[in-house]
Structure formats: C-alpha cells, structure tokens
Image (cartoon, helix red, strand yellow):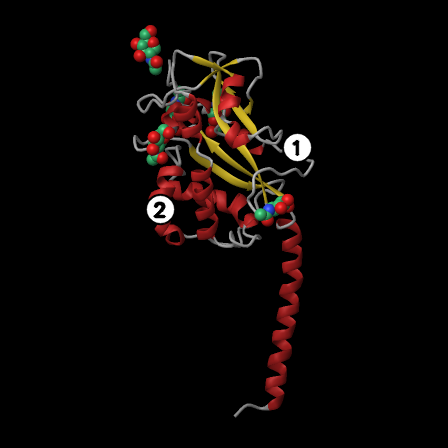
Amino acid sequence: MFSPVLLLLASLTSLALTLDSDHSNADQHKKFCTWKCLKFTLQWPGSFCVGLNNSTKCKIPTSIQNWTIHGLWPSHVQDCCECWPIFHSDLKELDPELSQFWPSLLKAQSSFNFWKDEWIKHGSCAGCVEGMNSPLRYFQICLKLRKKFDIDRALNDDAGIKPSCNQSYQYKEIKHALAPITGDDPDAQIQCITDSKGREILFQVKIPLSRNLTFGCHDGRQDAESESTQHWNTYSAHPCQLKSSIFYFPINYNNPHQPCG
Ligand SMILES: *[C@@H]1O[C@H](CO)[C@@H](O)[C@H](O)[C@H]1NC(C)=O
Ligand SMILES: *[C@@H]1O[C@H](CO)[C@@H](O)[C@H](O)[C@H]1NC(C)=O
Ligand SMILES: *[C@@H]1O[C@H](CO)[C@@H](O)[C@H](O)[C@H]1NC(C)=O
Ligand SMILES: *[C@@H]1O[C@H](CO)[C@@H](O)[C@H](O)[C@H]1NC(C)=O
Ligand SMILES: *[C@@H]1O[C@H](CO)[C@@H](O)[C@H](O)[C@H]1NC(C)=O
C-alpha cells in the first residue's frame, strides 16, 4: 500500500530531477553539440614517427602496412566530455579492425588509450548525432569511413604513387591521385611535415564531412591546428607546399624515426 502523499512527493522529486538534468543537458548540448562539420583524418604510419622528437617513443607493428586513422573530429570543439566513460569491453567486437586501422604508434600508449583519448576529446561530441551516439557506434562509423576513403588504393593501385626513399612526387600528382577522396574542396587538406633534412614528406589527409557524413562541409572557420602541436611532435603538420617535391617514404619497421636515413 502506498500513501498518496508519498506518491505525490516521489513524483515531485522526480519532476525536479528531470527539470534539473534538462537544464544541465541544455548547457552541455550547447557546448558540445552545436558543431556543424567534422574532419576525418587519416595518417601515413611511415611518416608519423618522423615527426616525433625521439625515436624510442615510436613503434610500428609489422602488421601495419596501410594508412591508419588519426581521428574523426567535430570542428571547433575540443576536450568534449569526460562524462561519457568508455571501456575497452565497449569496443571488443571492433578490436581486431581497430588495431589494424587505428593503432597507437607510440610505445608508451596502448591502442585502447589512444581510442579512449580520441573519444574523450572528440568522440563524445560526435555522439550528439544519431548513429554515432555511443563509443561502439562512433568507432564503427570511423572504420566505415576508413574503408570508404581508401588512400592506399587511390595512391598505390590507381595512380602508381608508391612509397619510395629515392623518388619524390610533385604536389599536383598527389593532389590529382587523391581527387576521388578530397575532390577540389578547399577544406580538404593534404598535409606534410618537413624532416630534419628539409624534405617535404606526405603525412596526413583531412577530409571534411557534414553532420550526416556526406563529403564536404563549410562553416566558414579556420581549423585550429591543435592536433599537430601535441607535445611529442617536433615537426608540425602543414599543408604540403604547392610547388615542392613531396616524398612518400616507405614504412621502416626497424628505424621508423628515420625511414630513409
Ligand atoms: C628518448 O626517450 C627515452 C625514454 O623516453 C630516453 O630514455 C632516451 O634517452 C631518449 N633519447 C634521446 C636521444 O633523447
Ligand atoms: C593495403 O593496401 C594495399 C594497396 O592498396 C591493398 O592491396 C591491401 O589490400 C591493403 N591491406 C589492407 C589490410 O587493407
Ligand atoms: C633506392 O635506390 C637504391 C639504388 O640507388 C636501391 O637499391 C633501393 O632499393 C631504392 N630504394 C627504394 C625504396 O626505392
Ligand atoms: C547532408 O547534409 C548536407 C549539409 O547539411 C545537406 O546538404 C545534404 O543534403 C545532406 N544529405 C543527406 C543525404 O541527407
Ligand atoms: C621532446 O619532447 C619532450 C616531451 O615529450 C620535450 O620535453 C622535449 O623538449 C622535446 N625535445 C625536442 C628537441 O623537441
């Protein structure tokens, strides 16, 4: 038997709780969910370690042979929300694929810790959108995008642009080869780093997407280059120089820091 007063009290309390969480949800929503565009960023593992300032910090497992995911980032929001915990078991079914296509190349960081960082920094904001609203769904979407935007195929198979220490490529050859992926979109970026010998090295590709994940998006704002100024980078990523020759170094598993000497 329930007393009507208690029932009333209980429903008032839950109403208050609902209102309160609606209010903070609204704040959270405003902060994390108002983004318009995303950047899907793919990196060449053969170049990643070149940008590090200390070779001992990097490792490339021999199973890694192709372009890998750096992240899927809602634009202009950072350090989204630690309020949405992620556990390794959330990603259990994706683990083999994620380990292949989204590995950590830092010795000191497990792949799961890389995914976790990316989820906290970016994924939890992407989670505002239907279809990405859980860690599992977010990482699933990323793997789908990695298959859709197949840089290995565009460069190696379709354009014959293969990793080499000896041969460099003109920017316009690379741009042309990547046209199926980046189009002519000014918000798509082909990024290089400059190594210690002053060579321009192909490093990563940023693909602009709208909230519904179709290609292309403009919000009229410049990207903050936060990702390239992480503390372990000595050389920062920049748009490849239009006029320069660009190297696409092979992955050197024994000496990832200096793949071509
Ligand atoms: C590189 O880093 C490792 C540990 O992080 C350190 O032991 C080593 O001395 C460093 N090497 C150089 C050349 O700085
Ligand atoms: C890696 O890229 C090569 C060249 O495009 C392709 O033949 C191969 O299937 C890719 N491997 C994986 C695991 O995607
Ligand atoms: C670079 O050229 C040298 C000969 O000059 C050759 O032995 C080597 O296999 C070439 N390496 C690559 C990655 O093309
Ligand atoms: C996706 O979003 C863009 C930008 O908001 C819009 O122009 C486009 O029609 C949408 N496409 C689909 C398939 O919903
Ligand atoms: C290398 O990175 C460490 C932090 O990871 C930093 O303290 C150090 O100054 C860097 N060294 C160089 C030469 O950039």
Residue 198 in the image: x percent, y percent? 50, 12
Kind of residue at badge 1: Gln
Kind of residue at badge 2: Asp
Image position of 186 (left or right of 105): right
Vertical side of 166 occupied by 113: above or below: below
Q: CA distance from mark 2 to mark 1?
A: 34 Å
Closer to the chain start, of discs 2 and 1, is 2
Residue 78 in the image: x percent, y percent? 59, 42
Give whichever of 107, 122 is nearer the camera. 122
**Residue lying at 37% horizontally and 21% vertically, measured from the top left:** 250
Residue labelled with disc 1:
222
Taking the image as drawn, is residue 56 in sight?
yes
- Quadrant containing the C terminus in the rendered view: top left
Vertical side of 190 occupied by 242: above or below: above
**Residue lying at 67% horizontally and 62% vertically, measured from the top left:** 23
Within 10 Å of disc 2 (Cα), the crowding (few <14, some 14-19, many 20+) is some
- Quadrant of the picture in which ligand 2 is shown: top left
Image position of 112 (left or right of 23): left
Vertical side of 229 occupied by 23: above or below: below
Residue labelled with disc 2:
95
- Which label is found at residue 184? none
**Residue lying at 37% horizontally and 53% vertically, measured from the top left:** 89
* Mark 2 close to ligand 2, CB under 8 Å: no
Describe the element under mark 1 as helix, strand or loop. loop
Taking the image as drawn, is residue 60 in sight?
no
Give whichever of 250, 111 is nearer the camera. 250
Image position of 223 (left or right of 169): right
Q: Residue furthest right?
A: 220
Describe the element under mark 2 as helix, strand or loop. helix
